[in-house]
Image (cartoon, helix red, strand yellow):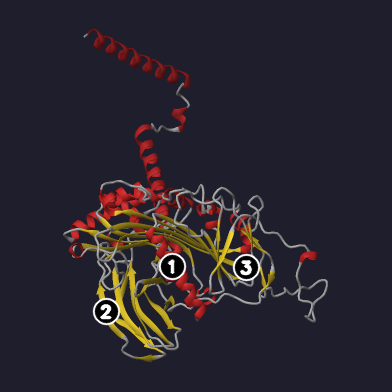
């Protein structure tokens, strides 16, 4: 416990130092498993709020700043996420879950406006502008995907009391959005060094989007010193990813895994069935996987960003001090008092490399336990109705957890509020302290449900409710309708920290899309046959077979040719007369 407290104090000191400086960046590496590595990139810029209002940008990106000014946005939080965080094996989420988003794209912001209609208009301006800036489909966040949370999400910035009454919180999600390199490139362009130097030079789309879990976040908020009017606008950009060490070490020109030769197999020879033809893999959980920065990210770190002048060490690694770590020549290593954190000061003009050799694991850095374990799934069967089950577990043996559970459901997923039930340790108890519910309107807005729950220590709550599936119009189905419809993750707010469950895939009653094609083909065939039959009746001349032999085919052809010539001569005469006139 003391080690965790000292680690938190160390990170808090780094955050305090970075809030004073104009620009700060840092990379934190934390092994989660002998073959998994968590890499957290943190970039933070501060600018004077007065200079920002005068459009005097220094480290704050001008492209984003002008969008915020035009849409009257006072605080912004944008997330791009993929994958699933395994809390049972990896512990608490990076940054305690404060910079995590749901699968796909998630956006929430505080917009200053006098009325709800004006706030909706500025929210539409904000989503469309961010869509073009980050090459994402944020313009599809319409009224059916937008909610106004009441109990969830609290402002993390310092806002004046005079403006708090005019701030409107709007929240939107796109769980179907596929995050890719097109979103990473605009993200890097917002940084002062733009991926050319410093820790941002390690960011590569091939590595980032090959991770088991990854999240990109952008947070903009005002920060004011207590007792003074000196306010700053702070932008924090974070990238977190969980990398598979063995997968990341594959060369880019040979990414296909191939079987290991027999002589390189590591077998457990203590097994009685071990032989030349049978090999039981040796458990390597007691050995650290060998890796280096150049193996994980494709190349070494290219010096430091010259604009990061706060004096903080740019690279830190969270492993016991007893482990062997080799750094490049000229780097200075600093260890803290917790026994698990070590940081490196880097020469700005030289490339930096870290190498962890393969070694026995005699001690592991403790994983921080999450405040809450959450999982959500569909229950029931059939194409008409269904249900949702959320299992929430408090792992603390002594402390209760007070949190807000929020669901943002699409309009075609109609929730039955009277079926909402909460069981604690299998018993029906009144643990719902407060609830906010806004029903859906067809094709206008979705369902919003917020529930405040208090979970006692070492307890599990099962939250269930039923819903009905609506039937969509023919044009409302996506091209891959048989895949299902993505349902946004539930948001669990614990104080200033928000964690997400996994997204869900809802199958809806899907019509047979081949029927319109069959109808078109059949109708066209009938029309073609009918037209041909009627045309033959009108044009052809039917005569008896004996009369047909009397017709001279050559004479008929000559008569037809003469008729065509007369028609052409008349047409030419008419054309000459028109020219003379």
Q: Is the residue 434 above or below the residue 28 in the image?
A: below
Q: Would you say the residues marked 2 and 3 are in contact, meaning their CB atoms lie under 8 Å apart?
A: no
Tell me residue 150's x, y (percent).
26, 71
- Element at badge 2? strand
Q: Quadrant of residue 255?
A: bottom right
Residue 13: numbered disc = 1
Tell me residue 125's x, y (percent).
27, 51
Q: Quadrant of residue 463?
A: bottom left
**Which of these two is toward me, 362 or 68?**
362
Q: Mark 2 points at which residue?
A: 435
Mark 1 vs mark 2: give the one in front.
Answer: 1
Q: How far apart are marks 1 and 2 (CA)?
A: 38 Å
Precedes in sequence: disc 1 or disc 2: 1
Residue 35: numbered disc = 3
Residue at 54% from the left image edge and 75% from the top image edge: 89
Q: Quadrant of residue 257?
A: bottom right
Instruction: Say left or right for 250 vs 175.
Output: right
Precedes in sequence: disc 1 or disc 3: 1
Q: Is the residue 339 above or below the residue 510 in the image?
A: below
**Which of these two is toward me, 197 or 393?**
197
The quadrant the C terminus occupies is top left
Instruction: Say left or right for 231 vs 461.
Output: left
């Amino acid at each position: 416990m003391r080690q965790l407290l000292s680690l938190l104090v160390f990170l808090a000191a780094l955050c305090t130092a970075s809030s004073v400086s104009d620009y700060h960046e840092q990379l934190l590496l934390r092994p989660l498993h002998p073959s998994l590595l968590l890499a957290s990139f943190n970039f933070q810029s501060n600018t004077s709020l007065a200079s920002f209002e005068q459009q005097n940008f220094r480290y704050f990106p001008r492209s984003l700043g002008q969008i915020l000014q035009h849409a009257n946005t006072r605080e912004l939080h944008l997330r791009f996420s993929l994958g699933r965080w395994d809390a049972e094996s990896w512990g608490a989420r990076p940054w305690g879950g404060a910079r995590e988003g749901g699968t796909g794209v998630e956006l929430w912001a505080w917009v200053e406006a006098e009325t709800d209609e004006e706030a909706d208009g500025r929210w539409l301006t904000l989503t469309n502008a961010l869509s073009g800036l980050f090459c994402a489909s944020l313009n599809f966040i319409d009224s059916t995907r937008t909610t106004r949370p009441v109990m969830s999400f609290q402002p993390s910035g310092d806002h004046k009391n005079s403006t708090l009454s005019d701030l409107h919180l709007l929240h939107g999600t796109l769980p179907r959005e596929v995050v890719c390199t097109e979103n990473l490139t605009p993200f890097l362009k917002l940084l002062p060094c733009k991926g050319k130097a410093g820790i941002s030079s390690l960011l590569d789309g091939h590595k980032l989007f090959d991770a088991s879990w990854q999240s990109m976040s952008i947070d903009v908020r005002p920060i004011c010193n207590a007792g003074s009017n000196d306010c700053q606008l702070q932008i924090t950009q974070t990238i977190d990813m969980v990398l598979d060490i063995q997968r990341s070490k594959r060369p880019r020109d040979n990414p296909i895994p191939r079987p290991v030769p027999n002589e390189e197999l590591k077998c457990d020879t203590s097994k009685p069935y071990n032989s030349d033809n049978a090999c039981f893999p040796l458990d390597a959980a007691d050995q650290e996987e060998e890796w280096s920065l150049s193996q994980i990210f494709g190349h070494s770190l290219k010096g430091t960003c010259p604009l990061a002048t706060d004096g903080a060490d740019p690279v830190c690694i969270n492993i016991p001090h007893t482990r062997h770590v080799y750094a490049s020549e000229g780097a200075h290593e600093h260890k803290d008092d917790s026994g698990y954190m070590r940081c490196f000061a880097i020469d700005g003009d030289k490339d930096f490399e870290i190498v962890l050799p393969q070694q026995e694991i005699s001690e592991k850095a403790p994983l921080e336990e999450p405040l809450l374990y959450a999982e959500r799934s569909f229950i029931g069967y059939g194409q008409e109705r269904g249900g949702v089950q959320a299992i929430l577990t408090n792992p603390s043996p002594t402390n209760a957890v007070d949190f807000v559970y929020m669901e943002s459901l699409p309009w075609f997923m109609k929730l039955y509020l009277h079926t909402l039930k909460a069981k604690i340790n299998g018993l029906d108890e009144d643990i719902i302290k407060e609830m906010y519910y806004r029903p859906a309107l067809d094709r206008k807005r979705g369902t919003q449900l917020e529930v405040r729950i208090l979970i006692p220590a070492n307890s599990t709550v099962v939250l269930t409710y039923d819903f009905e599936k609506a039937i969509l119009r023919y044009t409302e189905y996506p091209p891959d309708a048989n895949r299902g419809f993505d349902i946004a993750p539930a948001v669990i707010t614990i104080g200033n920290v928000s964690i997400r469950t996994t997204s869900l895939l809802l199958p809806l009653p899907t019509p047979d899309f081949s029927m319109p094609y069959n109808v078109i083909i059949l109708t066209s065939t009938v029309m073609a046959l009918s037209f041909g039959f009627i045309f033959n009746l009108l044009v052809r001349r039917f005569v008896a077979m004996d009369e047909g032999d009397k017709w001279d085919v050559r004479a008929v052809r000559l008569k037809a040719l003469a008729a065509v010539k007369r028609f052409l001569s008349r047409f030419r005469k008419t054309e000459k007369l028109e020219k003379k006139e």
